[in-house]
Structure formats: C-alpha cells, structure tokens
Amino acid sequence: MRPLHLQSEAYRPEGGIDARSQRRTLGRPALDFFDLFLRETLQNSWDARIGEGPVHFSIDAWRTTAGQKSVLRDLVFKTAPSFAGPGEILRCEDINVLVVTDTGTRGLTGPTRADLATGVDSNFIDLVRNTGRDERKGLASGTYGFGKAVLFEASACSTVVVYSRTIFGGAPIARLIAMTLGNPYEDAGRRYTGRHWWGVAGRNLVEPLEGPPAEELAAALGLNRLPDGATGTSLMVLAPSTDDAPLRDVVARLAEAATAHAWPHMVSTAIREPDIVCTFTCDSETLAPPDPTTDPRLRHHVEAYRRCEDLLAGRRAPGHTWPWAVDEVRSQRPDRRLGVIAYRDYPYNPDGNHDAVPAEVALMRSPRFVVRYMPVKPAPSGQATAGVFLAAPELDSDFARSEPASHDEWRPANLGLARNQRNPVRQALEQIKARFRRHTIPVTATQATHHPGTVSLASRLGRLLDGTVAGTDPRIPAFPEHGGSVGSATGGSTKFGPHNGSDRTGEPGNAPAGTNATGEGADARAAHAGSGSFGAQDGWIRQRNPARRPRAWLDPTVNMMMTVDGATAVQFSATVVVPEGARGAIVRAEPYVLVDGGKESEPPAGADVPHVICWREATTEEIQHGHQVVLSQPGTSHWSVTVSQPPDTAVSLRLEAREATP
C-alpha cells in the first residue's frame, strides 16, 4: 500500500480562516473538557442515526501496538510537516489513541468536495472540510458544526484519523482520511492556514482513501469497530491529552459523562425505549457507565423525566402528589405553554458528605440531552432537590437558538428579540426559579410576621419548652437507668433542640428529665414508675421484658414547614430502635394542636385537626402512609414524619412504640 499524500492548505488570495481560529470556535464553555468532548461526539452520532433504531456509541482507548505505530508512521503520516501535526508524537516510544465509534448511523455521507452542490447530506465535508454549520440541517445538537473542534483539542498534536462506511450514490463505500489543525505559518514565500489532510492526491486537494484499501488500512490501525456491512464512523484521536491522568481514568470519566448528559436516552419510559447504547473500554477492559436508574443522584431525575414525558403525552394530569410536583410551565403574556416540569425533595447522603447536597433541575429539549443542571434554591430542610424541565416541542427552535456552540446552557439574549418582545426562554427560566422559592422554611422566632399563629404561640411556650415541664419533678430521671425509653415524644413545630444547656443528642437514655427533646415530664415520670415497667397511661401496656421493648423518640432538630398538595405541613424527625429478639415494632404517631395551656383536648366543632400524611425512612426512602409505621427487622432507623398543620396553629407530635404481636 502506498503512503497517504499530504496537503497543507495555503491561504487563498481573498483570505480565509486559520486552523487556530477553528479550534477556538467553542468559546469558553463552563463544562469540564471531557464532559464537552463526550457531549459533542455523542450528539453528532445521534444526529446521524438511522430511523428509530438504537445508536451504538463506543469509546475505546489503548496503547498502540508496534504494528499499528508502524502503520501510522510509514503509511498514514509518512509525509508530515516538522512544525505541525503528528511528526513529533510518532517519534515517541509509546503512543496512545482514543477512538470514538458509532453504528446504527449513516456514516459520513455526501460528496467529498465542498464546492459541489449535490442536494444530498453533507456530513463528510461538514466534518472534514467546512468550518461552522449548515443552517439547512436545522437546530439539532451536533451535525459536525463548531463542536467538532473538541476532537482536535483532545489530541496533543491536534490530529484525527477519520474512517467511515456509508452509502453514497446508492452503493456502500468506505472512506479514510487524516487531518491536523495546527498554527498558521509561512514557508517558501507562501502563507498557510495550518490545516493539513492526508489522503489520495486529487484535483487541487486530497481525497479520502476509498473502498477495500480504506478497509484494509482501517483494520491495520485497529479501526475495525464497525460490524461487517454496517454503516457508521470511527474517529481516532492521536495521543489524547490526559493532563498526566492515567488513560483508564479518562475513559472512566467519559463513561460517567455519558450517563450524566445522555441518561434520558438510556432509560425506558411509557412512551419510548432506550435508544442509545454506550460502551467504554481501555486496553480491552470494559468500564461500564453508571446506571442512571440506581445512581443516588440521577435516579430521581429519571423519575421526574418519566413524569414529564407522561404529562407532555397527555397520560398524566398536572398536580401535586407528594412528594412529587408535576406541572405545566406557562407564561401569562402571551398565554402559552413553555414546557413541563416535575420535581421533588429527597434525602441525599451517599458519601456522608453534607456539603455537596445537589439542588438542581435538568434542562432539556427535543433531542433529550441534558443541556444543563440548573441550580435552584436548596431546601432549608437539608434535603436534596431533583427535577426535570422539558421545553415545549412547539418552542424547541427558540430554545435551540438560545444555545451557544457548546450546547451547554440557554442564553435568552441569543434569540435577538426586540426589547419589548416576550422571550420564552427567559420566561421559562424565571418561572423555574420562582417555583423553588416555595421551599420549606424553618419556623423561628424571627419569622413571626410570616407565621403569626405558630410563632406567637411559640414565644409564649418558649420557657416551657426550654425548661422544666410544669407538674413534674426535675429530680426524677426521664428514663430508667437500664436504657429503657418512654415510647412517646412531643415536639412543637416552632422550637426543637437540646434544652437546659444540654448538648445531648435526643436519645432517650441521654435526655435530661422533663425536656422536650424526648418526652413530656408526665410521661417521663410514668415511664420511671415501676422500675422499668410501663403503667397503663396514654395507651401504653405494661411490658415485663424491657430489653425487648421497641423505642421511638423525636430527634432534637428544627422541624420544617412545607407545602403538601397545596396545604401547610410540618416534618418531624424520628428515631426508632427495634432491639434484637423483638418480633418487630409498631410505632404510632399522634399529632395534636398546642395551645397556651398545653395541648388542645377538644377542637372546636368543624375545625381542622392535624393528621399524619406519611412516614419516610431516611436511608431506603421507604414510605408508609397513615398514623403508624410497621417494622419487621431489628435495628435503628431514622424517619421523617409529615403532619398536616391547620391554619394558625402550632402542632406537636407524640410517638408510641410497642412490640408487634405474633
């Protein structure tokens, strides 16, 4: 086989764009580079898909063999300018490559010359010849526009080998060409742009190597990732820049990026099946991308996405079904749908790191790639927030035009609308932000103007909650010394935490007598009576084996107000201990209204009364509805108990725990 011929592009008399400028077409995106690399290459593959079948996308990295290095040096880049491209790299002992392959796609279709008008797809010249994008292709996410610059930026020598199998003129054809984007330079009295191609000498330019010779050279380079007879494209990045990171770590990072940005294509919904299959290898070791349906952060976005899809398709009505909110996002002037949104709060602590709790909404439009994870106001409860916003299909072109070349955000100003013209992108972003001003608000004494019914009552009860409960003897310990605990606890929605200067945790065995952290003084005294046996008070039944007695108490944390189905609710934090040997536990929550003299015993006729909405386990997120929760296994578990709060009231809660009966 003869070595490929080198063409170095000279400036035309009327000028032109240099290679350095072409590499800078992406600007300064906020994304990490390998996130950007993954997004651009995968989006280009998606744009070239055939029909409704899935796209198979792979990234493979390896250290070239001696034979592959010889092919690169002696056949592909035998004639290489010493001041640009792969010449210096090929003199290195070890050469790494990074290969991006897609199948289930059309390959690099169309003519190989940019000056011919054929009226057919032009993927080959868009990648190999042209700079920018053809507006006739519409506003998809890739189509080898400015984003192809990531291929050259990923290479230490800005060099890519392109191999594709496609259909052109009604017949299958294989094509192979190499190219470099260097710096402008002068040589022998002429100026050059810095763009170079290696192929077969043609009329005033090099053409790609085609047919069986292209197949043979691709196989010699290891670019035989395309199944026999299948169309598609392989792009070999020569000497990928890894910033001294191991090549394996770079591939693993790309696998994570695939899940982070393309998970809507990897999951099934009621409307569509997964339509992108991603694989990643390094030196033949498979590095599987994370599963978005089990990832502690993304799985909630997946559920939000499914709800958005159902709402767009008319399979679901807008509404709030705790813990989810699913709704249309609309503008008032003009009255139109901007998109749909679904979101929820959820416990998040996979790494024990409370400093990195996400609060974000994934923004996306018709191609269903995540444009951006938009930060929203965090929940004061400390929970994470996950949501998805899908732009309305009828406004997809507006959202697309707002995106920069890197497709990583929506910029309303990019629409170029008149000053007084309504901007749907700006309206949507503002509406999304406004929805998260509704987040849970801790009720404190400084917020009396916002919650007068709750906080004014809290002020009057402050001394009672912070000190000794009336009617009890503080010298009597709240719980037996052997570690038993009262099975009840109270806590106002206003003030909750360590009392009497104590820094105890709220574990019943540690709490000072009469404190609100674990129980009312009267209950504490009753618990102590009988040396560990319970009297028949507040529904408690005498138990003769305290060691097997389940325990439950409210944690000394600030309780949070929230909105559930349009009504105010309060969330309490509770701990339940089921000892070894117990048959399980039944824990019952009894909410009640606090009044000046204690608790309300007889509500006025027709008045709303608080009720338990649900229990949620902090780790597994198991949800049980109703006043009681049933536990079958021994151990310690942490729960949030959500209670409705009637208007202008303060509510409290009592917990009762008992062993499950056989």
Image (cartoon, helix red, strand yellow):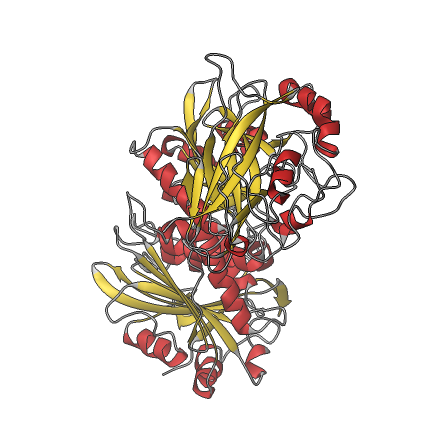
Up/down of 210 relative to 593, above or below: below
- What residue occupies the far front of the structure in this picture? 530
- Quadrant for residue 232, please give it: bottom left
Up/down of 265 relative to 250, above or below: above
Question: Residue at point 55% right, 35% down?
Answer: 654
Question: Residue at point 54% right, 26% down?
Answer: 592
The number of discs equals 0
In-front residue for pair 154/353: 353
Report x, y in % for residue 587.
47, 43
Question: Residue at point 60% right, 76% down?
Answer: 82
Note whether residue 129 is visible.
Answer: no
Q: Name the side, left or right, on which 372 lies relative to 53.
A: right
Q: Name the side, left or right, on which 629 lies relative to 86.
A: left
- Quadrant for residue 128, please give it: bottom left
Report x, y in % for residue 620.
46, 51
Note whether residue 660 is visible.
Answer: yes
Report x, y in % for residue 629.
44, 43
In-front residue for pair 494/213: 494
Q: Quadrant of the N terminus?
A: bottom left
Report x, y in % for residue 653.
56, 33
- What residue occupies the far right of the structure in this picture? 501
Up/down of 629 relative to 143, above or below: above
In-front residue for pair 190/70: 70
